Amino acid sequence: MVRVNRLSVLHVALALFALALTARAAKVQLLDGKIWGRAAEKQHLAQTSLDAPRGEIRDAAGVPLVRSQERVRIAIAPPEVRDMRELTRALSRLGVGRSVIRRVSDRKHKWVELSETFQPSDVVVLARMPGVHARSVSERLYVASDGVRRIVGRTGSGGVAVDGLELALDSLLRGVRGRTAAFRGANGERYESPDLLTEPPRAGSTVTLTIHLALQDICDRALAEAAAHLGAEGGDIVVLDPRDGEVRCLASRRAGSRVGAATAVTEPFEPGSTLKPLYAGALVERGLARVDEMIETFDGRYTVAGRTINDVHKAERLSLADVIRFSSNVGIARFSERLTDREQYELLRDYGFGTPTGMTYPSEAAGTLREVRKWTAQSHASLAIGYEISVTPLQLAVAYGAIANGGRLMQPAIVKSVQDADGRTIYTHSPRVVRQVLTPETCATLRRILQSVVDSGTATDAELATFNLAGKSGTARRTSGGRYGQGMYTSTFIGIFPGDDPQYVVLVKIDNPAKTYYGGKAAAPVARNVIEAAIASRSVNLDGRTLAAQKIRSAPRFDPAPVPLEQVVDAGAVVEDSAPRGPALPPVSLVDTMPEPPLRGPIRFDLGRPLRDVPRTDSLVSVPPVAGLPLRVAVRELHRAGLKVVLAGSGDGATQPAAGAQVRSGTVVRLWRP
């Protein structure tokens, strides 16, 4: 029998304790070492995240629209303040309000955070005072333009994207947050150390838009002036480059709203007569009609499926070209009967209606295009004149872009390029064709018809002095509470500029104008003003060489004789189109039809002789024949000949001296108003 004494038991117990202690130490240091290391680091070091500067947003010319700026946010712990008087003086110098200073001076408050942010250089002294806690924040600075703010959107507290492109491109703009650390004392004090590793923040990418700030400003001003002049509730302007689908301008305005969404992308409307050219193109493309084909329009009154459709411009017969030129509801309804319901639906669907365009912008509306099985007996005719369908201004501009570029429906783009924080380009926009909707030949025909709309049709108020402009006006009734409201209209004009080799599609939509609601009177002049300002601006991206080569021509005629029209407005009519016009104008040469006057030879002055002895160098010019021309055109022709013009009374457009007379350049010619 083995006897165990007390000393042996004690030795065994000590050995087991040493073994357990070693095992525990091994577990703590080897297995759980990282866990305890992180706990110790958390206890002794204060970790702080660093905001990453959001990337810049620039316009197409590189002008910053949005950028981030480093600011300082101040918080004060009154119990920690040593010299309250010095602190309050420093706060007063920064412009802090008295109510905030009173709260800071009351030591009962444990923590007071200032709502303002400050420039780092302004708070260097303040930040060093005991009880003052300063932290660096990144703040967004925006161009002072409501139009731009609607496009780029906003960021909220903490740099969180709220809407607009800030939200759509947040993953590119927000960057990567950094990290820094400081030693923490027993009482919570922090001690900076250069030996502590810090992960610097990585700035967000720089996004360059297709928007031109100068053109955006032109459109914003034009829209504001139009709303004020017409007493309108608001409106939208879209400028699109049809060649590559890049959006140059998105101007939106609503009564009572300062900064909101770009409603040109988010709010659909019934387009009215602006859909008629799309139908004309489909009919010509399918061989179902010719542009010079005449059709009975029944003196502007036609009943289909129990609904009477009326024309503002009444005529017994109109060609397809003049149906567009004078925006005949009856004519387009009758021509559209040659399309089946399925063909009509496919026509509108192919232009992208009823589905978002896919442009980089949140909350883009798809509009409404009902399936054929949901149509009523009146839907076929209603769709032809632009009702029972809703489209966004952007969708409609894209559709007209296809007419402008030869039939290619382009996906619109608002982002031109993206560069990362190192300056490397990681994205560049490439034009994307969604589908071919028309042949180039049909598009050229449609553009000639749309030029006649501006020259002598329903949108003469959009006519430019020296360049051809193609376009279409539209006037549609607006709904209120699910029904068409009395005296509520949407006035629209879409211009293709220039008419021959287009560079821009300009869409203007005016909501509820109070003075005049016809699209040709309310919206068309706004489009003209935008285009004229764009031509005059040096900052707008227009190809001046191409424009200089283009000269205005006579508007094309597709009918053998002018169609007499009279103004009739029926109180129960479905109102479409622009303001009433008089008889159709005959095809006449407008401007730039005469050669430039000969250049004068150089004038040499002999300073040794009196000035009266200097020989006259005035050249003789011939008074051009201007009888029968519109007044504006006649004046321009006389000016181009080097003559001065004085308007006389009404007459037949005769001049004194008479046409063909040889006079000196600069002679005053009296013109009797035609």
Image (cartoon, helix red, strand yellow):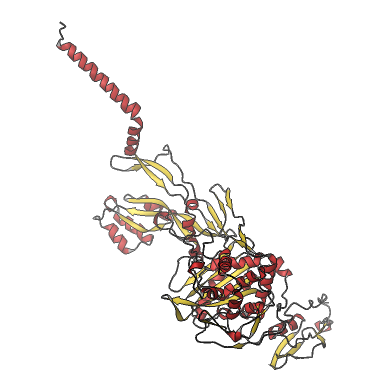
The residue lying furthest to the top in this view is: 1
Q: Quadrant of the N terminus?
A: top left
- From the top left corner, tell me how far across and down residue 148 is, in percent: 51, 64
- Left or right of residue 558: residue 261: left
Relative to 534, residue 58 above or below: above
Name the foreground residue: 630 vs 55: 630
Relative to 352, residue 256 above or below: below
- From the top left corner, tell me how far across and down residue 274 is, in percent: 58, 74
- Left or right of residue 39: residue 512: right
Name the foreground residue: 175 vs 120: 175
At horizontal 26% and vertical 22% (from top left) the residue drawn is: 21
The number of discs equals 0
For residue 40, what is the image quadrant? top left
For residue 17, what is the image quadrant? top left
Residue 590 in sight: yes
- From the top left corner, tell me how far across and down residue 251 is, in percent: 53, 68
- Left or right of residue 520: residue 34: left
Residue 463 in sight: no
Q: Quadrant of the C terminus?
A: bottom right
- From the top left corner, tell me how far across and down residue 481 is, in percent: 41, 75
